């Protein structure tokens, strides 16, 4: 069970809100004014952060934390959460994600309602009662000294390769671009050689899928790491071995239920620290472009305090 932090530990200051108006293809855009009104019931000033790009959003969150906000709330999906986590990870600033994107894996895995209004009511009640619950985050360190944090899952296999291709494509727009990227990468699918060090123990393996989960889900409720626990201080590693195209496409739908881990070509591991290396792979964390391999991923217990 998640621990509850005492009321007198909540920092003073306004509630900063980072909203992504394009999240969920704009479905929840009209909800922002009532969401802000409900947050104001907590009796603190509510400050909407200004940002036009993902980089600006992350910078705005970092600046707000430095300036002494009392809490940070996001309205959007996993990408918006990812930007905020870079600012609040390892600090005393509590965080509340309002799920309003196409993928809301971190918010839902940490117990927030799928309905944005219900989620903001939960966050407001936590602010009023001074209640927070700590959960783990994963910290990613690159060979060049770069560092990122994530809450859900880091992908370092086929899914990451597809994302990288889709991001390079200028046409078509929308989901169709991702579909075409999948087809292109399936045509050239091949297992890659990975070096995996789990708490110092080295494994050399050939794989098509590699995921390192702090949480269970990615990509909109795909349970890629179904046994992951956000409060156990451990990372769950799922490796899909030498799949050919036909086997991969048969197994992939099973990820939604988490039953893919029973396939004989899938291996699962658990560790506090994961060192991962392979040639030519750019990782994606919480669905966002992260760092090139090699990386070291560390489970950091109670790295963020959730308003729940």
Image (cartoon, helix red, strand yellow):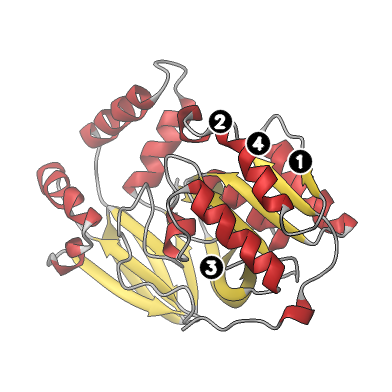
What residue sits right under mark 2 in the picture? 29
Q: Residues within 10 Å of mark 2 (few under 14, many from 20)?
A: some
Q: Which residue is mark 3?
A: 297
Q: CA distance from mark 2 to mark 4?
A: 9 Å
Q: Residue at x 40, y 66 (%)?
A: 195
Label 1: which residue?
Answer: 49
Structural distance between the alpha carbons of marks 3 and 1: 30 Å
The nearer-to-camera label among 3 and 4 is 4
- Quadrant of the rendered structure where residue 108 is? bottom left
Instruction: Provide residue 134's location: percent of width, then percent of height.
Output: 60, 76
For marks 1 and 4, the one nearer the N-term is 4
In this rendering, the label closer to the viewer, 3 or 2 = 2
Residue at the extreme front: 41
Pinpoint residue 57: horizontal percent, then vertical percent.
70, 40
Marks 1 and 4, how far apart in space? 14 Å
Disc 3 and disc 2: Cα gap in Å? 35 Å
SS category of the residue bearing label 1:
loop
Q: Is residue 208 left or right of residue 201?
A: left
Q: Please tell me which of labels 3 and 4 falls first in the chain.
A: 4
- Secondary element under disc 4, as helix, strand or loop, is helix
CB within 8 Å, label 3 to label 4: no
Chain-order first, disc 3 or disc 1: 1
Residue 213, horizontal then vertical, whole percent? 42, 65
Residue located beneath label 4 in the image? 33
Residues at circles 2 and 1 in contact by the CB criterion of under 8 Å: no
Residue at image x 50%, y 42%?
Answer: 100
Spatial separation of the CA atoms under disc 2 and disc 1? 15 Å
Label 4 CA crowd tier, 10 Å (few <14, some 14–19, many 20+): few
């Amino acid at each position: 069970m998640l621990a509850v932090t005492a009321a007198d530990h909540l920092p003073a200051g306004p509630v900063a809100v980072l909203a992504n108006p394009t999240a969920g293809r704009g479905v929840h855009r009209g909800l922002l004014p009532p969401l802000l009104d409900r947050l104001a019931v907590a009796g603190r000033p509510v400050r909407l952060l200004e940002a036009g790009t993902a980089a600006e959003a992350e910078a705005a969150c970092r600046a707000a934390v430095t300036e002494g906000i009392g809490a940070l709330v996001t309205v959007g999906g996993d990408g918006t959460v990812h930007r905020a986590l870079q600012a609040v990870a390892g600090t005393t600033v509590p965080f509340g994600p309002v799920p309003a994107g196409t993928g809301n894996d971190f918010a839902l895995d940490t117990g927030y309602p799928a309905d944005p209004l219900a989620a903001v009511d939960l966050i407001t009640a936590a602010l009023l009662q001074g209640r927070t619950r700590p959960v783990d985050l994963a910290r990613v360190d690159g060979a060049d000294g770069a560092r990122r944090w994530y809450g859900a899952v880091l992908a370092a296999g086929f899914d990451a390769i597809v994302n990288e291709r889709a991001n390079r494509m200028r046409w078509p727009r929308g989901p169709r671009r991702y579909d075409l990227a999948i087809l292109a990468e399936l045509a050239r699918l091949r297992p890659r050689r990975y070096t995996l060090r789990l708490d110092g123990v080295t494994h050399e393996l050939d794989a098509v899928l590699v995921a390192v989960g702090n949480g269970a889900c990615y990509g909109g409720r795909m349970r890629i790491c179904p046994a992951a626990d956000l409060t156990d201080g451990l990372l769950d590693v799922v490796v899909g071995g030498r799949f050919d195209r036909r086997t991969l496409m048969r197994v992939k739908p099973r990820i939604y239920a988490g039953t893919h881990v029973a396939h004989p070509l899938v291996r699962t591991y658990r560790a506090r620290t994961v060192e991962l290396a392979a040639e030519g792979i750019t990782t994606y964390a919480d669905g966002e472009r992260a760092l090139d391999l090699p990386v070291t991923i560390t489970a950091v217990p109670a790295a963020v305090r959730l308003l729940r």
